[in-house]
Image: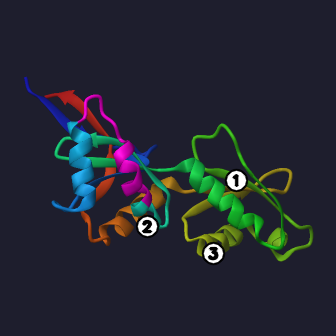
Amino acid sequence: MVPVMAATLSAQSPRFVPGEVIAKFVPGSEAGAAVARAAEREPLDLTGLEPIAARLGEAAGVPLRPVGLNSGHFCVLSVDAGQLGERLMRRLERRQRVERVEIVPDTAAITLSVAFAAGSAESRMRPARLVASLERELGLPLKGEVSRNGRLALQVNLEALTLSLVERLKALPEVESVQPNFLLKGFMR
């Protein structure tokens, strides 16, 4: 029997790690050279890739951090959830009709609790319309619902962001290829 790897398919979860992509850089590029240097180190040291991830994240509009290397000099990059949450909180706090924004701790996703001023247009909007408006303003795919206390629980849609991030990174000249970090499951045939 030969072990075979196949992508895991599940109706309950995405087929990839939300918030993670695997990128291969153009040979001879600064990013490609940094990955080659990191791959030669034992134990693995990704600190040399942090400036590359920061630069790519800046270009893509989403903070990134390196989290691993795969065979073939592929670099695994992850959305920096802490940085993205802080960035969103600061942007929302600058809105005139926002009374309070908090990052919801201890959640696997990037979730913010947003309170709008009583009587404001936002406080009277249907949640779906408000979320769509904030998506356009913030440039990120979002999900949201109004809680019992009237606050908007706003969450970054990491699955949609991952797919968008792939397209944003593909457009960069130093990126040879990029894809979501697909989940694989081994099984015997």
- Residue 38 drawn in magenta: no
Distance Cα–Cα, label 1 vs label 2: 22 Å
Amino acid identity at mark 1: Leu
Q: Could you say which disc has been placed on residue 137 in the image?
A: 3
The quadrant of the rendering that contains the C terminus is top left
Q: Is residue 120 visible?
A: yes
From the image, tell me which residue sits under label 2.
60
The quadrant of the rendering that contains the N terminus is top left
**Magenta segment range?**
41-54
Label pair 1/3, CB-CB below 8 angstroms: no
Q: Could you say which disc has been placed on residue 7 in the image?
A: none
How far across and how far down the image is residue 144, in percent? 67, 58
Q: Residue at x 20, y 47 (%)?
A: 36
Label pair 2/3, CB-CB below 8 angstroms: no
Quarter of image, res 6: top left
Q: Residue at x 69, y 72 (%)?
A: 129
Q: Residue at x 32, y 72 (%)?
A: 171
Amino acid identity at mark 2: Ala
Pointer 1 or 2: first along the chain: 2
From the image, tell me which residue sits under label 1.
112
How far across and how far down the image is residue 154, in percent? 68, 57
- For label 1, the crowd category at 10 Å Cα-Cα, with few meaning under 14, some 14 to 19 and many 20 or more, is many
**Of 189 and 48, the residue lying toward us:** 48
Element class at badge 1: strand
